[in-house]
Amino acid sequence: MIYYFSGSGNSRYLARLIARESGHELISLNIFFKDNCRFRKGRELLDCVKDLPLPDDKNEALVFVHPTYGWRQPRLITSFLSVSAGQLENRKLYFVATAGSGFGGSEKYLRRLCQDVNAEYMGLATILMPENYTAMFAIPGEEEAKQLIQEGELKAVRAGAAIKEGSRLEADSGLCRWPFILSAVVNPIFYAFFVKSRAFYADDRCDSCRICELICPLNCINMVSDESFALRPQWSDNCTHCMACINHCPTGAIEYGKASQNKRRYYI
Ligand SMILES: Cc1cc2nc3c(=O)[nH]c(=O)nc-3n(C[C@H](O)[C@H](O)[C@H](O)COP(=O)(O)O)c2cc1C
Ligand code: SF4
Ligand code: SF4
């Protein structure tokens, strides 16, 4: 079974290819989280219905496809797998991570996670895709994004074939540089100081369509009336910075302080 979490669609797009290639069923963790889980500060799981759909056959591998946040797997994936530990025991776990530029020491943390939940680590596929962090980095142009997606597709198909055969996945060591500095030192600083929702706002381009509210996988957005009685999104501090809202808003009304102004949006 393949589970994906995705902000701007990169991981979902590749998860679909992997599912087609491997013949595994596909489950959206975005929808599962939205419907079943409550998070605090985008990572601490307050409660979560323990009925994650799992294959009856205990020998069937579980594949997690997700973006990279601060050179590791997103903290909400760590929290989620940790609370699902009882159901993951003795299962085989594969990981496919997407990133905009590099994976640092991601692999070490995924191995550790598997140890913690008593699951067998089956490897990590590292696939570069277009950067989606509108609140912090530049988003690639259309041509560059297209090229990255084409290369990503090939890697995803290869990963799907390996998963079907039951072979292990191997991370590309060239994309896993400075593991200690980036994943051990910078990651906690990044989460403590940068992953905040305070700077999000919607400007006059907002037409109250509610898509941002619907798309947020952690239910962080509520529509409230402004002084002229128009409905506008308001962000709670549960946000995990997945960038779905800002990249998917059909009118481009969402900004993250000044950091996102005049930047391209990216959503596949
Ligand atoms: C909060 C956040 C943190 C990110 N951190 C990294 C990172 O450490 N290294 C990197 O190469 N890309 C990083 N990115 C880029 C994404 O990992 C990358 O664009 C990914 O493919 C997005 O996948 P998605 O569309 O499935 O969410 C980050 C993006 C976000 C939103
Ligand atoms: S998605 Fe954009 S236009 Fe629609 S309600 Fe949200 S901010 Fe407004
Ligand atoms: S508020 Fe936006 S960035 Fe934050 S978790 Fe929801 S969709 Fe993602």
Image (cartoon, rainbow, N blue to C red):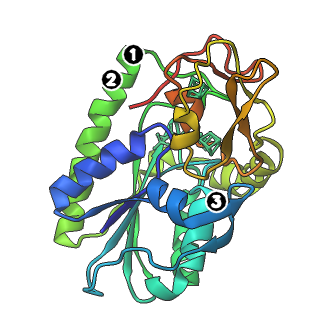
Q: Ligand 1 falls in which quarter?
A: top right
Q: Quadrant of residue 106?
A: bottom right
User: Eyeballing the image, is 60 above or below 132?
Assistant: below
State how far apart marks 2 and 3 are (Cα). Answer: 28 Å
| x, y percent for residue 164 | 18, 67
Nearer to me, 194 or 144: 194
Q: Which amino acid type is shown beneath numbered disc 3? A: Arg
Question: Can you tell which mark lies on residue 146?
Answer: 2
Instruction: Using the rendered image of the protein, determine whether residue 231 is visible from the camera's viewpoint.
Output: yes
Quick one: 100 or 203, which is closer to the camera?
203
Query: Along the horizontal axis of the image, is 66 left or right of 24?
Result: right
Secondary structure found at label 3: helix
Q: Mark 1 touching mark 2, by CB under 8 A?
A: yes
What residue does disc 1 label?
Answer: 142
Q: Give the residue drawn at x 28%, y 46%.
A: 155
Per the image, label 1 sits on a secondary structure element best described as helix
Residue at x-position 26% and y-position 40%:
153
Disc 2, SS: helix
Residue at numbered disc 3: 75
Determine crowd level at label 3: few under 14, some 14-19, many 20+ residues with C-alpha closer than 10 A.
some
